[in-house]
């Protein structure tokens, strides 16, 4: 699961600079950089601030962050069957202005 990459993907698609997001979240740009590069994992409070600043539910971050390697081999078939429905449900929770962004990021 690559939460930092998911955050960066959404931030870039929104055309937001790292410094802008950091300021909105009241964290340093260095801290945000470390999160986006995977050197540091955001604590729940920071993740909530980031999601609020991006106007994206936390669940969307986790869906985008999910990687194929996160799914055990024995669960791959179920994952491939269920994940499209989970993604569709997550998209319903996202503001319509963000839907194409999330669809691209999870494709």
Image: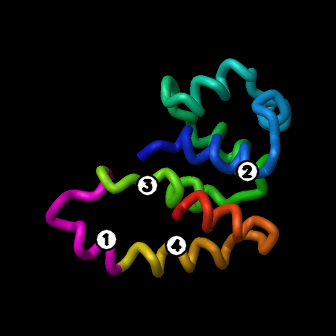
Residue sitting at 72 percent across and 44 percent down?
Answer: 12
Q: Secondary structure at mark 3?
A: loop
Per the image, the residue denoted by label 2 is 13
- How far apart marks 2 and 1 lie (CA) works out to 26 Å
- Residue furthest toward the top? 30
Count neighbours of disc 4 (C-alpha within 10 A) and say few if under 14, some if 14 to 19, many if 20 or more: some
Q: Which residue is mark 3?
A: 66
Give the magenta part as a residue range.
70-81
Q: Earlier in the sequence, mark 1 or mark 4?
A: 1
Q: Residue at x 77, y 56 (%)?
A: 55
Q: Position of residue 15 (x, y in %)?
A: 81, 45
Q: Using the image, determine if residue 68 lies above or below residue 36.
A: below
Q: Does 2 sit left or right of 45 as displayed?
A: left
* Residue 73 forms part of the magenta stretch: yes
Precedes in sequence: disc 3 or disc 1: 3
Residue linked to disc 4: 87
Q: Is residue 77 left or right of residue 5?
A: left
Q: Is residue 56 above or below residue 48?
A: below
Under circle 1, the secondary element is helix
Quarter assignment of residue 100: bottom right
The tag on residue 79 is 1
Q: Mark 3 or mark 2, which has the lower sequence index?
A: 2
Tell me which corner region of the image, top left, top right, bottom left or bottom right, holds residue 28: top right
Coordinates of residue 38 in the picture (x, y in percent):
49, 30
Indicate the secondary structure of the residue bearing disc 4. Answer: helix
The residues bearing labels 1 and 4 have C-alpha atoms spaced at a distance of 11 Å
Exactly how many numbered labels are in the figure?
4
SS category of the residue bearing label 2:
helix
Verify CB contact (< 8 Å) between mark 3 and mark 2.
no
Which residue is at 28% across, 58% downward? Answer: 71
């Amino acid at each position: 699961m690559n939460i930092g990459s998911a955050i960066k993907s959404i931030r870039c698609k929104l055309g937001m600079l790292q410094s802008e997001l950091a300021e909105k979240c009241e964290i340093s740009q260095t801290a945000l950089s470390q999160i986006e590069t995977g050197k540091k994992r955001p604590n729940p409070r920071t993740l909530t601030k980031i999601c609020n600043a991006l106007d994206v539910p936390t669940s969307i971050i986790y869906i985008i962050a999910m990687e194929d390697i996160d799914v055990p081999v024995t669960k791959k078939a179920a994952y491939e069957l269920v994940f499209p429905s989970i993604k569709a449900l997550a998209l319903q929770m996202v503001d319509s202005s963000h839907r194409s962004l999330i669809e691209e990021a999870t494709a």
